[in-house]
Image (tube, helix red, strand yellow):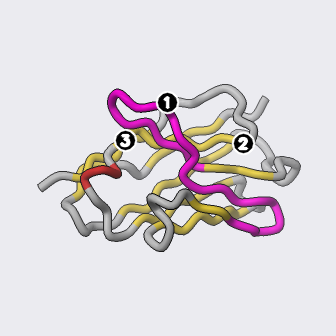
Amino acid sequence: QVQLVESGGGLVQPGGSLRLSCAASGSIVSINEMGWYRQGSGRERELVAGITVDGRTEYADSVKGRCTISRDNAKNTVYLQMVSLKPEDTAVYYCNSWPPGPWGQGTQVTVSS
């Protein structure tokens, strides 16, 4: 079972940017789709962005145009570049396959002035 470790979160002001990284303990080349998910306080976990092994992407409407997901299969890493962050983007962000396997610790993103 591949383990996933998320990093790159933090406190950022509205309008700011962050780049999240997800490092896998093993190869992700056999995982067709990887995704970034988030769970805000009192909310259900939701899929934010997904990327297939051949690079096709999809985004939730709430982040479309503000987030870019990418994957480096050689480095077994998935990224989420986020710009123009809003307070409603505050959440714990997780990466996982689609459909998801066991969850990691996630990385906290807080957007606040």
Q: Which residue is at 53% across, 41% downward?
A: 46
Q: Amino acid at mark 3?
A: Ala
Image spot of residue 74 (x, y percent): 77, 61
**Residue at the disc numbered 1:** 105
80 part of magenta stretch:
no
Q: Amino acid at mark 2?
A: Ser
**Residue at the disc numbered 2:** 97
Lower sequence index among marks 3 and 1: 3
User: Which secondary structure lies at badge 2?
Assistant: strand
User: Magenta segment, which residues?
Assistant: 36-57
**Residue at the disc numbered 3:** 91
Mark 2 residue crowding within 10 angstroms, few (<14) / some (14–19) / many (20+): many
Residue 33, numbered label? none
Q: Amino acid at mark 1?
A: Gln
Image spot of residue 4 (x, y percent): 63, 38
User: Which secondary structure lies at badge 3?
Assistant: strand
Between the C-alphas of marks 1 and 2, the distance is: 15 Å
Name, please, the residue furthest toward the left: 113
Lower sequence index among marks 1 and 2: 2
Image spot of residue 24 (x, y percent): 68, 44
Q: Which residue is at 60% across, 29% downward?
A: 103
